[in-house]
Image (cartoon, helix red, strand yellow):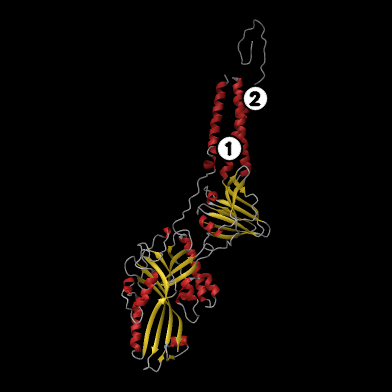
Amino acid sequence: MRSAPTSRLVAGIAGFGLAAGALTGCGFPERVVGLHDAKVETVDGAGVPEATAVTITQRALAQAGAAFAAKASDTKTHKAILTGPALRIAALPDKYTDEAGTSLKNPATPTILAVSAGRDWPRRILATTLVDGVQWLHVLVSEKPAEAYKLWVTVPMLPGSSVPALPPLSTGTDLVEGDDGLVADPPAVLNAYGHLLDIPAPKDKKWAKLVGVKDPYATGVLAASKAQVKALGKLGTFTRQHDPETKSAESMAFRLADGSALAFGQQQRVDLMKPTSKAKRLDLPSDLASLAGEKSVTKQLRLDWLLTFATVIPKDKAATVIGVSEQLRDIEAK
Amino acid sequence: MAILKRLVGILLALAGLVPLAVGSWFAVKLGPSGEATFTVPDPGTTPVVFGPEVLNRTDLPVRIDVTTKPGGTARAIVGTSADIAAVLGDAERRTMTGVHVREWTALTTRSGSGATPDLNVRDVFRINEDLPERGSITMTQDTAPETLVIAPTGPGFAALSATWARDTWFYQALVLAAAGALLTTVGWLLARPGPKRRVVHVPAGTPVEATRAGVTR
């Protein structure tokens, strides 16, 4: 008589127990705690996400602007945020106004063009800002984990020029070593470009195959050289000589989406004017006279320039210079 | 049949005691807010690393509570595992690898032997901040996977713990305890001795109209 209700009760309790177990006990880690495998960290792709790159670039450009504004002798301030070509410009004597520093006084919000691929160091960020209608390219470098990003180069783009497509930001951009897949390596291209602008005119025809000189800067320099030679006539001589800025031909190149490269590097240029025996003296324009401390020269005027370039180097065609910064760094008048 | 019923009752009661004890214990430990806190035993002075295998194993935020000894502070850095590893180098550290639920402690392993590098590094980490003598940092899952390092400065840690919170855990513990209590009660009811059997002597010749269980003639 009591066995049937008892069985129902036991079955009910067992059912309740199973339900409670399902709610609380069975598959405890997964169902109750919600335990699952952690997401796998990707080790390829961009070294830093875009948002972080923007923050880093904003901070670095603001600091770089302050560093450029510091005295040339303040190497500690310069080296804290500048390196490579940018440091070289900031270290120039204060009397030579640098346009790089001027552009960084009020840096605009940067747009990130590229972030070096991979988690290793050094890491690079390629960014651009628009300042007073001029598009500037900036490269930031972090050499090692414990070192913050520093401004490596900053250069204005030439009017009408553009940067070809870069790989997607999230995948990161590879750096180009040497002439890997390019018509020539960046130092060779810059060397050719410099020689093509030399006065007297170059004789090696292979340079013209490496880089074109139809950009606004080259056109302007060649025209100015021609005008200078013409102006001096038989009263003086004018020479213009380009050379690599550093023995190691320091450069950096980002691989573009089509396999070409966007390269940065520096050259030095020396302009030399000497009056001939037919000239009594050469009078200097007021700005040069002010810098030189002389109103005229009887022996020579020597202008030493530091040039910073941004160049697009294709795989098999002549390269194109898309950005130039021309910085006077020394003047000798006697 | 009676023996079988009592046996089932005893088994049910015993089976119910386990969830009753476990559920009650969890309910007391978790509290109404359902906080599961695991402390790092003897945290000492070396940095403690919380990797994705700890921080990102659930969809819940993880709160790391840090208490340093008087006069000390701690630096909290958050970044990718690869970046953290690159900055720490061979620095001595403890890495949390899991939890010991019964003791509510964090399981850790030691590695490295070098000194702790300067962690005041810009740009590499998403978070790099000083914590006060008693501070905390909460890691959400929005930016997973990430690694957190808590490095003490000065006299070292007084206490360090990781907390996951989910209020339903408390109610689940209560349900478990209630289920266990119910099983135990029913089991006890089944297992308890029945009412003492009475012997009724019926005079001879008296008609018997009804027979109840437990009554014999």
Q: How many marks?
A: 2
Label 1 secondary element: helix
What amino acid type should be assigned to the residue bearing mark 2? Arg
Residue A32 versus residue A142 in the image, above or below:
above
The percent position of residue B124, horizontal first and vertical second, equals: 52, 61
Circle 2 residues within 10 Å: few <14, some 14–19, many ≥20: few
Query: In the rendered image, which residue does mark 1 sit on?
Result: B175
* Along the line of sight, the residue nearer the viewer: A124 or B208: A124
Residue A46, quarter of the rendered image: bottom left
Same-subunit check for callouts 1 and 2: yes
Q: CA distance from mark 1 to mark 2?
A: 25 Å
The percent position of residue B179, horizontal first and vertical second, equals: 58, 34
- Taking B69 as reference, is A240 left or right? left
Query: In the rendered image, which residue does mark 2 sit on?
Result: B192
The percent position of residue B93, horizontal first and vertical second, equals: 59, 54
Chain letter behind tag 2: B
Residue A323, quarter of the rendered image: bottom left
